[in-house]
Image: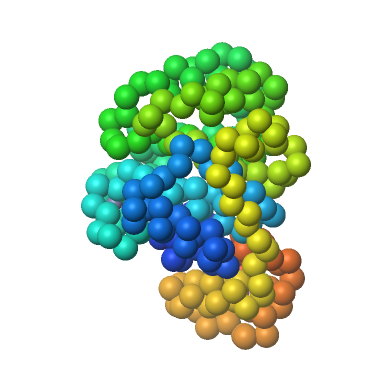
Amino acid sequence: MSFYQTYRPMKFADVQGQDEVTSILINQAKGNTFHHAYLLCGPSGTGKTTTARVLAMALNCQSMDGDGEPCGQCQSCRLIREGGHWDVLEIDGARFRGIDEVKELAYRAHLFPMGKRKVYIIDECHQLTEAAWNGMLKLLEEPPPHLVIILCTTHLEKIPDTAVSRCQMFPFVKLKPEQIREKLESICKSVGISPDSRHLQFIAESAQGNMRMAENTLEQVCQLKKA
Ligand SMILES: [Zn+2]
């Protein structure tokens, strides 16, 4: 597994640089006042999909302890982390195109969840076809009470207004070099390597606010050192 996957945050508090977003979500989790639809938008590598997964964990965690964070240990949290939870579906907007797939998704949305809630995470949702949006809008308009839809996109301007208006919107911002560097340092510590601090600074600055890019670069540098 890549650094990006291995060191993916499992709690809202561990998502770097999006404090406004995560503090609202923590409050919702504390009060169990979740919305039925979210729109996470912003540049690549800023933590949208990661946050969507943590939110899916919080929505289904079997032992929330009042701090607004998923426990990360229960069966539900573990299955979501591994991508194998029966109620949490991650859909790639670029591949999700046919009418049959939309119908299937809508049908499944109405089936009662085995856990607490059904969660659909639609990544790169600006790539959905018109047919797919029509199906999605129906779900957003009349959602089954147990369904939560999390739309993620790098292109807010391409999302139909009718969808935007039905979601709670969370803008993600580019990460600052020091925030990226902090994460890179913690990865290096976990891996047991002590890189040159100038190298880390260079990686953090050249990533242009994209954490995933920085983590991938760090991984490549580590592989080069091993070779
Ligand atoms: Zn849990």
Find residue 209 and report its horizontal and vertical position in percent. Answer: 69, 65
Could you tell me which residue is drawn at 34 percent across and 48 percent down?
A: 32
Could you tell me which residue is drawn at 59 percent across and 74 percent down?
A: 179
Would residue 178 be found to the left or right of residue 8 on screen? right
Find residue 156 and report its horizontal and vertical position in percent. Answer: 71, 44
Q: For residue 177, which quarter of the picture?
A: bottom right
Q: Is residue 152 above or below residue 215?
A: above
Q: Is residue 60 above or below residue 186?
A: above
Could you tell me which residue is drawn at 49 percent across and 71 percent down?
A: 187
Find residue 102 and report its horizontal and vertical position in percent. Answer: 56, 19
Q: Report if residue 10 is visible in the image.
A: no
Q: Is residue 227 above or below residue 108?
A: below
Could you tell me which residue is drawn at 59 percent across and 25 percent down?
A: 137
Image quarter of the C terminus:
bottom right
Q: For residue 221, which quarter of the picture?
A: bottom right
Q: Report if residue 84 is visible in the image.
A: yes
